[in-house]
Structure formats: structure tokens, C-alpha cells
Amino acid sequence: DTAVSQTPKYLVTQMGNDKSIKCEQNLGHDTMYWYKQDSKKFLKIMFSYNNKELIINETVPNRFSPKSPDKAHLNLHINSLELGDSAVYFCASSPQTLNTEAFFGQGTRLTVV
Amino acid sequence: AQKITQTQPGMFVQEKEAVTLDCTYDTSDPSYGLFWYKQPSSGEMIFLIYQGSYDQQNATEGRYSLNFQKARKSANLVISASQLGDSAMYFCAMRGMNTGNQFYFGTGTSLTVIP
């Protein structure tokens, strides 16, 4: 059983389109995250979602919006895609305790053409 | 705010030798956790080791150990007896009690193990 699963693994789309990436975790964790990894491999936190509390990184454009239908899912919607949105997007989850690592999905490679 | 610094963009090590990957951090949180992850070329994020800010002993997990120096705010990863499969990106990360459960990552170090 995959602990944190993301779909799709690859996504190629044209500029201006709207797309979604789905994420599901079966670990019973309270907190879920979205990270963006750019071409230089830098991992940047975009959002965290914990018990209906959303924490948004202030540098994230409002074209990006997380949607959580329930505790096990945190989907990422992106409107009006731009070339600079091309990156690998990782979903992750963790319990709230400080001494527990984040569990990552396999990543979604988004390419905007 | 949390800040994680990894000053070595790339490192080389001979197979079977030990290597130290540097990580320094800055935080005002009184309690925090430090983590190391490995990202091979296949792209997945693999958790390696954890160190708590109040832990008295340095963490160890098999060939991985964490050299934690709290006063210097450093949490270096030591890999002993390097193997070819250790070639990957390595990320240091921190999680603090006052920062919304978020994990903050350093810029990573690319490790290449030479046969």
C-alpha cells in the first residue's frame, strides 16, 4: 500500500490551462503539505493544511489553491498556468508531533509549454 | 522564521570512505526537530534520520549519524563506508513547534560516490 500517493506522475499542458494534482494519504496523519521543487532542486513549502487550518506561503501566487475534501486528501489546483510553474510538485503528510518525519508522495512533474 | 543552510552544493567521496554533509540552521523556536532526506536520481524523497533539539545523544541509523552541535546550530550528516548507491541529493530540514508544523528545507548537497 502506498502511504502518500499523487496523480498524475507526469503532466504536460499548455500555458493558460487550468490543472489539478491529486494527493491522498492513508497514514491517518493530521497535516498535509504541498512543496514545489524547481530546476535547481530547491524545495519550497507552498501550503500546509491541518485540521481545516490552511497556512499559505505568502510567496505563492493566488493562481494556486489547495482543496481538501477530507483529512486524507489535499489536492492542488492551478489556474492560468505559466511557463514558470514548470517544476516537480510533492505532496507530503505528517502527524503533528515534532519528532516525526514527513512522508512524501512520488512527485508530479509538471511541464508547461 | 526558520532558515536552513547547506553550503556544499556538491561533494565527492571515494567508495568505502566516510563523508560529512554540512547543515546549519537558525530558529527562535525553543523546541524543534532536524531531519535529513535523500533524493536519488529517480526523484523520491527518502527519510534518513531525525534529531530532536532536546536529545542528549546524537542520532544514528545504520551507516548514517547526525553530528548535532546545538550551540553552533549545526546538524551535520555523516555517512560511513560510502556506497555507490549513496550518490544522490541530500537535504537537511527543520520543523519547529511555532511554525505551523511546516518542514523547511535547505538547498541540498549533491553527493557523488566514486568507485
Image (cartoon, rainbow, N blue to C red):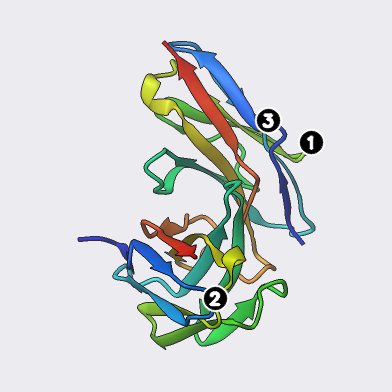
Residue at x 63%, y 71% (from the top left corner): B100
Label 1 Cα neighbours within 10 Å, binned few <14 / some 14-19 / many ≥20: few
Q: Amino acid at mark 2?
A: Leu
Instruction: Using residue A27 as the reference point, say whether residue B56 is left or right of it.
Output: right
Residue at x 61%, y 46% (from the top left corner): A40
Disc 1, SS: loop
The residues tagged by marks 3 and 2 sit, at their Cα atoms, a distance apart of 33 Å
Of B85 and A93, the residue lying toward us: B85
Residue furthest left in the image: A1
Label 2 Cα neighbours within 10 Å, binned few <14 / some 14-19 / many ≥20: many
Of B58 and A37, the residue lying toward us: A37
Q: Is residue B2 visible?
A: yes
Q: Nearer the viewer, mark 1 or mark 3?
A: 3
Give the residue number, with chain letter if any, for mark 2: A81
- Between disc 1 and disc 3, whose residue precedes? 3
Q: Which numbered disc covers residue B72?
A: 1
Labels 1, 3: one chain: yes
